[in-house]
Amino acid sequence: MRLSTIVFAGAVLGALAVAGAVFAQQKVVPNEFGPQQEKPVAPKALAPQPKETDVAPGLAVSYWKMLVRDVQEVADIVGKRKPDIGAPLPKLDYKMKTGKVLTSNQDDGVAAEILGYIKLDKPGQYTFVANSNDGVRVEIGGEKVLEDPDVHADRFSPAGKVDVAQAGWYALRVLYFERKNEATLQLFWKEPGGADYAIVPESALARKK
């Protein structure tokens, strides 16, 4: 083997080793995907705050059988076409791949409006990220927090920041659709002062009885 060939092969292997080391050191967390919004939103807490006797665990969900390409199409259908009411969602942590989407009876072509409350019990700044397949929009206290609106494979949305002045329950609305094939819907948060993201827990979600 020629010396030049040996040198070239060594250089290639060295470059691959460096690239592998860099990749291994990368911590893949949601805030590395997509730009963050320019300004935090400041949603309003529910007033009056719901009593424990007025809420039930999980989130209410309505479904429509439709093939769409943008989450705005889901928003446009709400109130105009009668939905199918699904079983409540305990939390937003679904990686369904194939099969029934969320608690619907459909494998494909599903649009959903998810409604309820989210408890933000620490004043300060929260950061939210969604992992979805396909489109998603998250609103808290009437403010749009994040959106990844179109058809796509699993990916994290741009992060959305929420400034919480008053701890308590806030209105939560999630619009979501799955067009074809695989389906994913996960909602993560990073609490004030927190270093890592976590799935929003069941204890922080509720719906009106």
Image (cartoon, rainbow, N blue to C red):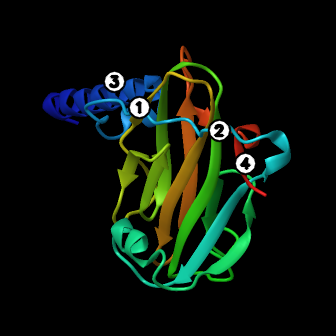
186 w.r.t. 104: above or below: above
Residue picked out by circle 2: 48
Residue picked out by circle 3: 18
- N-terminal of the pair, mark 4 or mark 2, is 2
Disc 2 to disc 1, C-alpha distance: 18 Å
Residue in the picture at 46% in, 27% down: 24
Disc 4 to disc 2, C-alpha distance: 16 Å
Q: Where is residue 182 in the image (x, y as percent from the top left)?
A: 53, 70
- Determine contact: label 4, label 3, CB under 8 Å: no
Q: Position of residue 196 (x, y in %)?
A: 55, 24
Residue picked out by circle 1: 42
- SS of the residue under disc 3: helix
Q: Can residue 29 be seen in this view?
A: no
- N-terminal of the pair, mark 1 or mark 4, is 1
Of badges 4 and 2, nearer the viewer stands 2
Residue in the picture at 34% in, 68% down: 72
| Image quadrant assignment for residue 168 | top right
Disc 4 to disc 3, C-alpha distance: 48 Å
Of badges 2 and 3, nearer the viewer stands 2
Disc 1 to disc 3, C-alpha distance: 44 Å
Residue in the picture at 49% in, 64% down: 176
- SS of the residue under disc 1: loop
| Left or right: 88, with 98 as reference point | right
Image quadrant where one finds the C terminus: bottom right
Disc 2 to disc 3, C-alpha distance: 57 Å
- N-terminal of the pair, mark 2 or mark 1, is 1
Q: Where is residue 128 in the image (x, y as percent from the top left)?
A: 48, 37
